[in-house]
Amino acid sequence: MRWSNGARASVGSQLPVASCQLSVVSGQFQANSYSQCTVNDFHRRVGYWALRIVNWVLSTRYWVLAGLTLLSWLTPSTASAATEKQISIYSPVAVYSLPVVERSGRDYVGLLELLEPLGRVNTDTNGRSLKLRYNSIDAEFFAGKTRAKIHGHEFDFAAPFLIENSRGLLPVSSLSAFLPRFLGTPVNFHETSRRVFIGDVAIQPSFHLDNTPPSRLLLSFSAPVNPTISTEPGKLRMTFSRDPVVSPGSQSITFENQIITHANYSENNGEAELEVDATAPLMATYSSDRRTITLTSVQAPAAAASSGQHPLEPPAAATSPSDNKAGHAITSSPPRRILAVVDPAHGGDERGAALSDKIAEKDVTLGFARLLRHELETRGFAVNLLRNGDNSLTLDQRAEAANVAGAGIYISVHAISQGNGARVYTALLPAEGESKGVFHAWNSAQSAALQVSRIVSAAVVAELQKQQFSAQERPASLRPLNNVVVPAIAVELAPGPDGINDLISANYQQRVAAAIADGVASVRGQLQVQP
C-alpha cells in the first residue's frame, strides 16, 4: 500500500502492496480501483472497514466528535466505580460492610466473608461442592444448585449457589432465611437497601423541636452514633455508615417551625441517611455519650456551649474558611478519644487452654475481643486490637505494642472453663529497683499506673455484678500486665448458666463485653487522652 506522498504503510501481510493505491483528496482518503485488489472476500471487507476507520479518525472535522465519544466511554466506568454495590451487616459481635457482585442479574455476596467476622469458620472445596463448619454447625453447598445441607437439614436458596476460584457466593436475597440457621437469632434484612440486622441491634432515633429562639432540633438515639455530617444550602445531612440506625417511624417529618422545616429518612446501598431541611445554616453538636445530636441555627452558636455539648467533626470534604461561601458553620474538632488496646490472649501455635475437645482458648479470646472492641467504640473509645487473626505474639511484643501506642487503657482477654462469670486481674509486681526518670524496670513498669489500674478493675467488677454476673477482682503475677506502663487489666471469661457453651455464645459474650465497656467508660476521667 502506498501513500500519495511516497511514504509506505502495510495493511496486512496478505494484501499485495502494488494492488491498491490511496490518495488524499480534500482531507479524505479514497480507494482507487479497490475492486481490483487481489485478495479474498474476507480480506476485502477487513481492509475496507480498516480504511473507513482510519479515514474517520484522521478527518479534521471528526476530532471533536471523537473526543466526545471517548468521554462518553470513560464517564460510565467512573460512575460505576462510584456506586459500587455493598451490603452492611450489624451484629452484637461486629459491624462491617461487604462488596456485592452481580451474576446473571442477581446480587451475590461471599460466604466466607459474611460468616468469618461472626464466629469461627473453616471451609473445604473441590470446585463442585463446598463444605463449611461454622462454630459447631456443619454445612455443604453445591455449585450451580439451589439446595444445600445445613446442620443435617435441607435449605433452598432463591438462586443457585456459586463457586468461583474456590470462593463460595450465595444470593443476597436468601440472607434473611440463611443466617438464622447458623446464628440461632432473629435476622431483619432490609433487602432494597442491603442492610442486615442480627439480633436486637437497631438504633431508633426520636425528634424533639425546641421553638425557643434560636430554634433547636434534638435527635435522640437509643445507642451511641457517629455519623458523617455534610451540608449544602438549605440542608444538613447525616450519613450512618456503621451505625444500625433505622427509620424513626415515618420517612418524612414536618416541623411547625420557620427555620427547621423537615426531616427525611432514607436507606440506600448499605447506609442510612437523615436529611434536615432548614432556611438558615445549622450547626451540629453532640452530647458526651454520643446519644444526642443537637442542630442549632448559627445565629446563636453560644447556645451549644451552654448545653455542655461538643461540636461534631467536620466531614472529610469540608471546605476551608475561605471557601465557605454558603455561610455554613465550620465547627472545631472534638477532643481526641481515649485509645484502648484490647489484647486477645494466645494465637497461632499457642492454643491456650483446651476449654473443651473442640474449643481452644485462642478462638474464644479473639471472638470476645472483637466484640469488646465494638462495645468500646460505641462508647467513644478508639480501639487497637493487637491480634485480629490466628497469629502469635510474644508477651514482650504485646507489652511493647501497648506502650508504644500510648494507650489510655490496656485490656488483656483470657478464657477459662472452670467457675462462672468473669475474673478481673491487676498486676502483682515483683520487688525490683526503683525507676530512674523515664526509664522503668521492665518487670515493674506497671508501678506508676497501678493505682489507676485498680480503679478501672473495681469499676469493671462493679458493672459486671450490676448486670448479675459473678465477678471477682484479684491481683496476679500475670504477664504482660507488669510490663505495661499505662493502666492495665486482664479479664478472664468463664462459663455462664449454660456451662461451657456460653463461652462461644455471641449473646453471652456481648452482655459481658457491654458490662466491661460500661465499667471502663465510667472511669474514663482517670484515663489519659492521647494527643
Image (tube, rainbow, N blue to C red):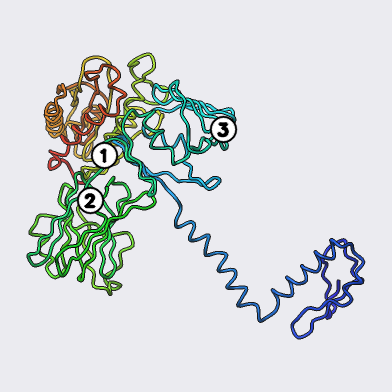
- Crowding at dot 2, Cα within 10 Å, few <14 / some 14-19 / many 20+, comes out as some
Rounded to the nearest angstrom, the CA distance separating label 2 from label 1 is 15 Å
Q: Which residue is mark 2?
A: 248
Q: Secondary structure at mark 1?
A: loop
x%, y% of residue 183? 35, 29
User: In this picture, is 472 found above or below 327?
Assistant: above
**Quadrant of the rendered image containing residue 39:** bottom right
User: Can residue 213 be seen by looking at this rendering?
Assistant: yes
Q: Secondary structure at mark 2?
A: loop
Q: Amino acid at mark 2?
A: Pro
Q: Amino acid at mark 3?
A: Ala
Residue lying at 22% horizontally and 57% vertically, measured from the top left: 312
Q: Which residue is mark 1?
A: 201
User: Can residue 474 be seen by looking at this rendering?
Assistant: no
- Residue projecting furthest to the bottom: 26
Residue lying at 25% horizontally and 18% vertically, measured from the top left: 498
